[in-house]
Image (cartoon, grey):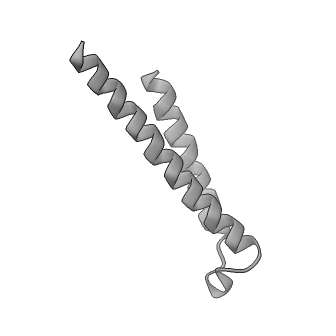
Amino acid sequence: MKYITYIAVAIIIGLIVMNAMILDFGNLFQGDSMVALISIVALLCAVCILLIFKMSKSIEEKSK
């Protein structure tokens, strides 16, 4: 399970980089830039959720 979370985080970081390349800082809140910005925020939330899951699993293992 540990490797799956690491792979998922790596894929998410790749998607964040890809979406960051789409951003147009001149028109950040219009068109494709808005979609990329929303995607970046959603992907950052996904990373946080995966890290919380990983921490909860390590706490669970220590409590046993």
Residue 23, image quadrant: bottom right
Q: From the viewer's side, name the closer residue of 52 and 19.
A: 52
Q: From the viewer's side, name the closer residue of 22 and 59.
A: 59
Give above or below for 51 relative to 13: above
Q: Residue 55, image x and y in percent? A: 33, 33
Q: Residue 33, image x and y in percent? A: 69, 73
The structure residue drawn at horizontal position 34% and vertical position 30%, both measured from the top left corner, is 56
Q: Residue 15, image x and y in percent? A: 61, 51
Residue 41, image quadrant: bottom right
Residue 52, image quadrant: top left
What is the residue that sits farthest to the bottom in this orientation? Answer: 26
* Lateral position of residue 58 relative to residue 46, left or right: left
Q: From the viewer's side, name the closer residue of 59 and 33.
A: 59
What is the residue that sits farthest to the right in this orientation? Answer: 31
The structure residue drawn at horizontal position 48% and vertical position 31%, both measured from the top left corner, is 5
* Lateral position of residue 59 relative to residue 36, left or right: left
